[in-house]
């Protein structure tokens, strides 16, 4: 059994050396893998810090989802061999969700697995992507279709990294924060984005993931808003951001929860207003029929039937006898999409 993943919150990592202590117990060589944008912002300072205690190799790749490929994984592996990173070495992912997913997958298979650490630098990665161990790459057939469960042994979260994030990236993370509020902890819906809110989100995700690491039951509630959301992202040719898609998806899936008799109308109204007030639009990014097609193709669709997490109330998803999801007729899904677009 692997060790329990640990999250340490630490402000000012670029200037302090305290966070290096726990790393000493893990390895004495580190590969710091990041993207060029993140490297330009924080790379030299972080490398210098690590070099106070360790031998450090840096790999910096092109930013963006296009880098999350099998080819990029192989290129990184070849570089690691060239550096001579051995079994006594460890890998650090520093960046957003793309870097955490890709680098985590590299760590999972390099020499049959080396210790993996993450330093998430986007709000989305801090509250979601870096926790829970889902790592992987995209293929032509879809996103994250090749991958593994390989949780980071240690995640270091510094909210100071967020100061350089553009508004659109903050909004991206905001959607997942609202999701935790809607499925688990309504109090989060009123909070400002700060370290304490990020901590609460990490605690919720860790608790759920530890209960069901391989997503056979309760972990599925983290997919609330994502069945419609993923289909919207794909139907827009990924022009629509993950956050915008999930925000819209949550309102659509709240509508389904109401239509099927689980969620009260007032609560559907509250969810809609919260999402709107946060700055998201409910207009569909593609025609409803096109979104429907992508939903049937989703990797989580069973027998072409998309499954949904439904809410009983704000803060609680329906259990469906422990499966936490249910298939819904195409007719009703389409009605939900058209309703969204008319809001
Ligand atoms: P996410 O899934 O977290 O949105 P990405 O890894 O695609 O992730 O990151 C989004 C973009 O933000 C990338 O271009 C990345 O280089 C950039 N980025 C990551 N962290 C920061 C940061 N702290 N400040 C500014 N830009 C950042
Ligand atoms: Zn998500």
Image (spheres, grey):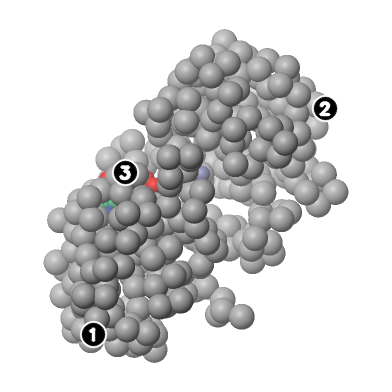
Place of residue 16 in the rendered image (x, y in percent of width and height, measured from the top left)? 24, 75
Instruction: Write down the residue under mark 2.
Output: 261
User: Helix, strand, or loop for circle 2?
Assistant: loop
- The answer to whether one can see residue 158 in this image is no
Give the mark nearer the N terminus: 2 vs 3.
3
Neighbourhood count class around disc 2 (C-alpha, 10 Å): few under 14, some 14–19, many 20 upward: few
Front: mark 1 or 3: 3
Tag shown at residue 206: none
Where does label 1 land, which residue? 54
Q: How many numbered marks, from 0 up? A: 3
- Residue 338 lies, in percent from the top left, at 61, 13
Extreme-right residue of the structure = 321
Q: Which of pointers 1 and 2 indicates the residue nearer the eye?
A: 1
Q: Rate crowding at label 1 as few (under 14), some (14 to 19) or many (20 or more) other CA atoms within 10 Å.
A: some
Pick the front one: 83 or 243: 83
- The vertical placement of 340 against 220, above or below, is above
Q: Find numbered disc 1 in the image and state the secondary structure of the residue it sits on.
A: loop
- Estimate the spatial distance between the alpha carbons at disc 1 and disc 3, rounded to whole Å: 31 Å
Give residue 201's position: percent from left, percent from top. 53, 55
Q: Quadrant of the C terminus?
A: top right
Residue 243 in view, yes or no: yes
Picture residue at 47% right of the left edge, 30% below the top: 234
Instruction: Give the x, y percent position of residue 75.
Output: 27, 61
User: Residue at left 58%, top 16%?
Assistant: 289
Counting residues from the N terminus, which is met first, the one under dot 1 or under dot 2? 1
Residue 214 vs residue 280, the one in the foreground: 214
Q: On the picture, is 312 further left or further right than 125?
A: right
Would residue 325 be found to the left or right of residue 78 on screen? right
Q: Which residue is mark 3?
A: 66
In the rendered structure, which disc, 1 or 3, sits on the residue that comes first in sequence? 1
Q: Is residue 11 above or below residue 267?
A: below
């Amino acid at each position: 059994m692997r060790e329990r993943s640990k999250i340490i919150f630490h402000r000012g990592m670029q200037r302090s050396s305290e966070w290096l202590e726990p790393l000493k117990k893990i390895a004495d060589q580190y590969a710091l893998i990041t993207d060029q944008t993140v490297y330009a912002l924080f790379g030299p300072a972080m490398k210098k810090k690590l070099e106070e205690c360790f031998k450090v190799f840096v790999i910096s790749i092109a930013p963006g989802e296009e880098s999350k490929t099998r080819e990029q994984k192989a290129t990184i592996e070849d570089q690691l061999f060239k550096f001579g990173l051995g079994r006594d070495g460890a890998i650090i992912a520093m960046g957003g969700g793309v870097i955490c997913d890709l680098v985590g997958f590299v760590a999972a298979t390099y020499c049959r697995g080396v210790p993996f650490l993450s330093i998430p630098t986007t709000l989305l990665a801090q509250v979601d992507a870096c926790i829970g161990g889902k790592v992987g790459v995209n293929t032509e057939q879809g996103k994250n279709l090749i991958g593994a469960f390989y949780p980071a042994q240690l995640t270091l979260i510094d909210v100071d990294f967020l100061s350089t994030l553009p508004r659109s990236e903050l909004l991206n993370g905001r959607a997942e924060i609202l999701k935790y509020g809607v499925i688990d902890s309504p109090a989060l819906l009123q909070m400002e984005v700060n370290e304490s809110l990020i901590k609460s989100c990490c605690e919720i995700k860790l608790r759920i993931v530890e209960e069901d690491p391989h997503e056979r039951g309760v972990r599925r509630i983290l997919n609330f808003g994502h069945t419609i959301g993923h289909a919207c992202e794909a139907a827009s040719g990924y022009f629509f951001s993950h956050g915008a898609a999930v925000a819209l998806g949550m309102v659509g899936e709240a509508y389904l929860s109401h239509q099927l008799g689980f969620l009260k109308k007032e609560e559907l109204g509250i969810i809609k207003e919260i999402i709107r007030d946060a700055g998201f639009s409910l207009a569909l990014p593609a025609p409803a029929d096109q979104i429907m097609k992508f939903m049937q193709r989703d990797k989580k669709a069973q027998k072409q039937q998309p499954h949904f997490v439904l809410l009983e109330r704000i803060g609680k998803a329906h259990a469906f006898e422990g499966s936490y999801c249910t298939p819904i007729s195409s007719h009703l899904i389409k009605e939900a999409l058209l309703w969204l677009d008319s809001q």
